[in-house]
Image (tube, rainbow, N blue to C red):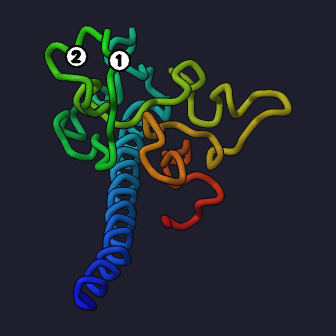
């Protein structure tokens, strides 16, 4: 009986610790993915006279997604476009349910787990001249301008984000991955 209690207590302590470790590992990989995308975007900017691309949020947008924009630098099927914690539930009336079910991922349906946050604010503008930089009284430095982030809050502390300075960080207040 004592052995059973000890085993149950051990599992009670161990399982949440293991889950937290797995969450941290997924969040860390997500930030690595965003950093790699940022690095590829840096190459794109260098090749395009330091002008931001026109990027759509979804595959159904009029503009191409970042996957298409970076096609020559990052393979479209590359795992860097997939957050390991990406989970998505489609509405029952979504037409894709018949082929992929209700439980899926953003990566499976959109080709990436990350969305381009401000398509109109960046599209075609030179770096430093984008609308967010010039908004009177509301301008933000490049380190504060969110460029891409998780489609949803896949992580317990919120969205991991790639900023316009091409650095990836968790949200403010989550300076360290928990």
Q: Residue 19 is drawn in which quadrant?
A: bottom left
Q: Are marks 1 and 2 in contact (CB under 8 Å)?
A: yes
Q: Disc 1 and disc 2: Cα gap in Å?
A: 8 Å
Front in this rendered view, residue 118 or 17: 17
Mark 1 neighbour density, 10 Å: few (under 14) some (14–19) many (20 or more)? few
Residue sitting farthest toward the front: 1
SS class, disc 1: loop
Q: Position of residue 39 (x, y in %)?
A: 38, 49
* Quadrant containing the N terminus in the rendered view: bottom left
Report which residue position mark 2 lands on. Answer: 97
Residue located 37% across and 20% down the image: 58
Mark 2 neighbour density, 10 Å: few (under 14) some (14–19) many (20 or more)? some
Residue 157 as seen in the image, left or right of residue 128? left
Residue located 50% across and 66% down the image: 178
Comes first in the chain, label 1 or label 2: 1
Residue sitting farthest toward the right: 137
Q: Position of residue 87 (x, y in %)?
A: 32, 38
Front in this rendered view, residue 44 or 102: 102
Label at residue 91: 1
Location of residue 171 with respect to 56 vertically, above or below: below
Location of residue 126 with respect to 86 vertically, above or below: above
Q: Position of residue 173 (x, y in %)?
A: 65, 59
SS class, disc 2: helix
Q: Position of residue 80 (x, y in %)?
A: 27, 46
Q: Residue 109 is drawn in which quadrant?
A: top left
Residue located 28% across and 40% down the image: 81
Residue located 59% across and 60% down the image: 174
């Amino acid at each position: 009986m004592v052995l059973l209690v000890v085993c149950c207590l051990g599992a009670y302590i161990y399982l949440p610790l293991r889950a937290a470790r797995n969450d941290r590992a997924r969040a860390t990989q997500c930030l690595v993915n965003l950093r790699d995308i940022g690095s590829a975007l840096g190459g794109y900017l260098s090749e395009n006279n330091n002008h931001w691309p026109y990027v759509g949020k979804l595959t159904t947008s009029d503009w191409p997604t970042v996957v298409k924009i970076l096609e020559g630098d990052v393979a479209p099927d590359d795992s860097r476009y997939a957050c390991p914690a990406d989970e998505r539930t489609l509405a029952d009336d979504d037409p894709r349910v018949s082929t992929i079910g209700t439980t899926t991922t953003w990566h499976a349906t959109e080709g990436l787990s990350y969305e381009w946050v401000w398509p109109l604010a960046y599209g075609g503008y030179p770096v430093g001249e984008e609308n967010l930089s010039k908004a009177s009284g509301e301008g933000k430095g490049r380190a504060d301008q969110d460029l891409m982030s998780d489609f949803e809050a896949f992580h317990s502390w919120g969205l991991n984000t790639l900023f316009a300075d091409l650095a990836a960080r968790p949200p403010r207040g989550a300076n360290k991955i928990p």
